[in-house]
Amino acid sequence: ATVGVALALLALSGCGGGGTLSKEELQKQYEAIQSLAAEGALVADGVADDRTTETFVAVHSLYLSEAARKVETDLRSANGPRQAVSLARQVADDLDRLHEEPDDPALARRLSEQLQASAADAEERAK
């Protein structure tokens, strides 16, 4: 997953304020969550394998977290399902932890596993 994919999914998701989500809108939100979680897992893998800089991890994980928080807010304002709101929040929380400790390989490995699980969950729910 790339930043471009995440941005495209967020742009396409376009939840309006209030009301309920169509099946297609909810699917797009799950796809956005999946993309953000998968990209976050890649960033965390970089930390765990000492393949990236602290600065990159801190900046990129914050960017991804903010995008996940936007999905969470959009889902909440559109009365989205609790499990979708919760999944977006979990992804954002995991990315926040990575942002706060961008140089902890053990934490990054755990977060990578959690983010991969969240991505798989979102992908399954998007079907």
Image (tube, rainbow, N blue to C red):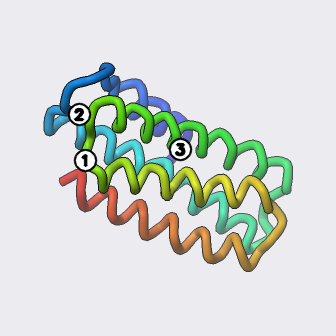
Crowding near the residue tagged with mark 1, few <14, some 14–19, many ≥20 C-alpha atoms within 10 Å = few
Nearer to us: label 2 or label 1: 1
Mark 2 or mark 1: which comes first in sequence? 2
What residue is drawn where x is 84% and y is 65%?
A: 103
User: In the rendered structure, which amino acid carries the disc numbered 2?
Assistant: Glu
Asked if 100 appears above or below 9 in the picture, the reply is: below
Query: Regarding mark 3 in the picture, which secondary structure is present there?
Result: loop
Query: Which residue is farthest bottom?
Result: 106
Quarter location, residue 60? top right
Residue 2, numbered label: 3
Q: Residue 81: x and y, percent? A: 25, 47
Q: Residue 1: x and y, percent? A: 49, 49
Query: Which residue position holds label 1?
Result: 81
Query: Which residue position holds label 2?
Result: 25
What residue is drawn where x is 53% and y is 74%?
A: 113
Residue 123, numbered label: none
Closer to the camera in the image, 38 or 81: 81
Quarter location, residue 3? top right
Q: Are marks 3 and 1 in contact (CB under 8 Å)?
A: no
User: In the rendered structure, which amino acid carries the disc numbered 1?
Assistant: Pro
